[in-house]
Structure formats: structure tokens, C-alpha cells
Image: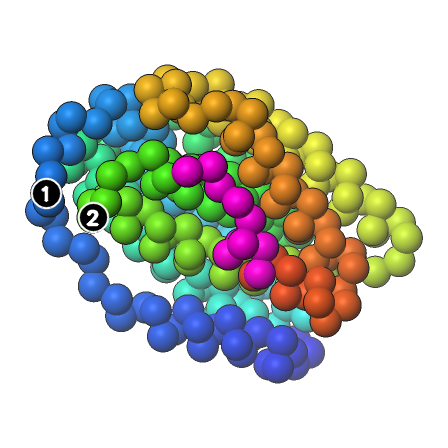
Amino acid sequence: MPSNANLWKPFKNLFERRSDRPLPPLEADLDYTQLPRSLARSLAVFQLGESGGGTVVSQARASRLDAVDDEYVSALAHFVAEEHRHASMLAICVRLLGGDLIRTNWTAKLFVFGRRLIGLRLKILVLLAAEVVGLCYYRLIASRLPPCNLRDWLLEIAADEASHLEFHCAFFRSQVRGQVSRFAFRSMWWSLMTISEFVVLIDHRRALRDLYIDRSDVRAAWRSYRQIVVSAVLEPSPESKSASSAACVSTAVPG
């Protein structure tokens, strides 16, 4: 494999530094059962989604794509491990809310199906869509919660997802070259995000309703990040390369 250590090493180092963080304690700092029951079910769906993704590492290890080298595979493995930590944190959240974990769900199955499609690029595109969905959703949910551990944990996960978004955007900057590939990326990305928006709004409609989160706010957040990704991948100026990071911090989420 060609060496791209300078491209992937910062991500690998970042994920490694965060790998020894302990899980939050399973203790309630307020009566979480007073929060809507639908929130527990909604977070259980996201918990299921954060639990997978391991096969993408083995596929990356066997890939012959440009810029996919040992450093990338190592960074990707750390990314998957961090996603599994999120799953463990969300499991704690679900239990504190008095909910139950689930083993199957139709929206999770759709994302798993997408990850299992042929081709590493398509799998990473599905993961990128999942990062945008999770990042926006966790922040929106947190904005409706009182100060508490649950809110802090969701914001911590969202902060991790922001760096995951940067990582996947860097991957596509290394792959998208020429007008044809630029058109293909834009078309597939917008289509995938439209589908993701549709299925998540349906599956999580009760939690959004019970927390008084307007669907228009969800759509506005997702569409903003959808464009952020396009700019970060297709307009790789020094400013746009860091656009995903800056926007993840500054993009307004209704409070």
C-alpha cells in the first residue's frame, strides 16, 4: 500500500488519545423516568446502530484504493472502537431512562444494508451519513434536556461524531478526482441524505414530538451539514478542509 501517514496519522493519534476514556457511571443525577418514554426507545435505536461497523475494517485492509494504507486502516479500527464506546454509553442512557435495549430495528437494518453493499467507498459514504444524522440528532436532543449527565454524555458523543465526520470527509477528498467522480459523489451523497432524513424522521417522530423538536429544525440542521460535507470534500481549500470542524462547533442548533 502507498504511504499516506501524514494524511491519516492525526486522526489515528486523536482516536488513540481518546481510547482510554472510562465509561460514565451508571447513576442517576435526576429522575430520568420523568422524561418522555419515547426518548428511551429512540436512543435504543441509535445504540443499535452504533454497535456495528466492524467488517469495514477488514475490507479496508484488503482494499487497493489510493490513500488506503496501513495508517488509514489503523485509524479506521480506532474509529469503529469509538463507535462501540458510544453504543455502551447509549446503553447506559437507555437504562437510566427506564427503557430496554433492542436487537433489531428497520432503520438500523437499512444502514446495515448500506454498509454491506459492495465497495469500500459506498460503505464509508453510509458511515458518513450516519455521522451527520447522529451528530445533529444528539445535539438536538441535548438542547431539550435539563442540565444533567445524560445531556453531557450526548454532547460528548456528538463531539466525537464531529471528528468522525472530518475523518470520512478526508477519505473522500483522497478519492474524488475529476468531474465524473465529483458529480457521482454529489449525487450519491444528496440521495443518501434525503433517504436518511426520511426514514429517521419517521422512526423517531414520537421522541421529536414529545421533546417539542420541530421537524423543520431537524431538516434545517441536516441540510446544513449536508452542504458542509459537499464543501469539505469538493472544495478542498485550506478553509473548506476545516469547514466541517468549524461548522460542527458553530452551526446553530435550536435551544
Location of residue 166 in the rendering, given as x and y in whole percent from the top left corner: 57, 60
Magenta segment boundaries in residue numbering = 246-255
Residue of label 2: 149
Q: Which amino acid, mark 2?
A: Asn
Callout 2 crowding tier (Cα within 10 Å): few <14, some 14–19, many ≥20 = some
Residue 252 belongs to the span the image colors magenta: yes
Q: Quadrant where the N terminus lies?
A: bottom right
Q: Which residue is mark 1?
A: 28
Sequence-wise, the earlier of marks 1 and 2 is 1
The kind of secondary structure element at disc 2 is helix
Q: Quadrant of the C terminus?
A: top left
Q: Quadrant of the rendered structure where residue 246 is?
A: bottom right
10 Å neighbourhood of mark 1: few (<14), some, or many (≥20)?
Answer: some
Whether 88 is among the magenta residues is: no
Q: Residue at x 37, y 58 (%)?
A: 82
Residue at the spot x=78%, y=38% of the render? 187
Q: CA distance from mark 1 to mark 2?
A: 8 Å
Residue 153, image x, y percentages: 28, 50
Q: Any mark on residue 16, and which?
A: none
Specify whether 201 is left or right of 6. left
- Name the one closer to the observer, 171 or 147: 147
Residue placed furthest toward the front: 255
C-beta proximity under 8 Å, tags 1 and 2: yes
State the image quarter where residue 77 is shown: bottom left
Using the image, determine if residue 17 lies above or below residue 127.
Answer: below
Give left or right: position of 246 versus 78: right
Residue at figure coordinates x 41%, y 43% from the top left? 139
Element type at mark 1: loop
* Residue 236 seen in the current view: yes
Amino acid carrying label 1: it is Ala
> Which of the two residues, 60 or 95, is positioned nearer the viewer here?
95
x and y percent of residue 3 in the render?
A: 65, 81
